[in-house]
Image (cartoon, rainbow, N blue to C red):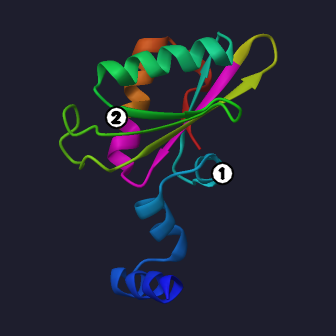
Amino acid sequence: MRLIACLLVLLLCGCSATQFKQEFIGYFASDVKASENKHVLNFDMSASDCITKIKDLLKNMQAIIRENRRMQYIEADNFQNVFDSTIDTTQVGILVISTPADKCEVQIASGNLGLAAFVSDEISKNLNPRPKEDAVK
């Protein structure tokens, strides 16, 4: 019965199963990795230091944060106080990947492309990325 109800909602929403999952269940690390519109930043710091600084920044933005430490993944929402074109449940996924020489890569994605760009810019301004590799993939 639940499956039928979910399929009915999916049909009425007019969105794909992937869109439905991202909008109603949330973003996952795999969604960020697979996103064609993700923002990619590189930092000269360890992944754990980067995660701590990103979480502090998100807290200052009054975002609600959920973290998967094992996957080095942060999911945040509640950005309506700092970004006009969003509602409280619009999520941003932030994946931090360790790279050689105590550096890290940060991938940022959201169903709201403007919000993803905003969060990426805020992270960039506050964490001082290596300038040559800041790009959208």
**Badge number at residue 65:** none
- At numbered mark 1, what does the secondary structure look like: helix, strand or loop? helix
Looking at the image, which residue is at 47% across and 86% down?
7
Q: Nearer the viewer, residue 6 or 71?
A: 6
- In the image, is residue 110 part of the stretch drawn in magenta? yes
Q: Residue furthest right?
A: 100
Looking at the image, which residue is at 34% across and 42% down?
115
Looking at the image, which residue is at 34% across and 34% down?
118
Provide the residue designation for mark 2: 118
How far across and how far down the image is residue 22, in percent?
48, 60
* Residue type, label 2: Phe
Image quadrant in which the C terminus is located: top right
Are circles 2 and 1 on residues that touch, CB within 8 Å?
Answer: no
Give the extent of the magenta segment: 104-117
Looking at the image, can residue 83 be seen? yes
- At numbered mark 2, what does the secondary structure look like: helix, strand or loop? helix
Q: Badge 1: few (under 14), some or many (20 or more) residues near its Cα, within 10 Å?
A: few
- In the image, is residue 62 part of the stretch drawn in magenta? no
Provide the residue designation for mark 1: 30
Q: Nearer the viewer, residue 9 or 101?
A: 9
| Separation of residues labelled 2 and 1 (CA atoms) | 21 Å
Looking at the image, can residue 129 be seen? no
How far across and how far down the image is residue 75, in percent?
49, 39
Q: Is residue 98 above or below residue 80?
A: above
Quadrant in the rendering for residue 81: top left
Q: Is residue 109 above or below residue 73?
A: below
* Residue type, label 1: Ser
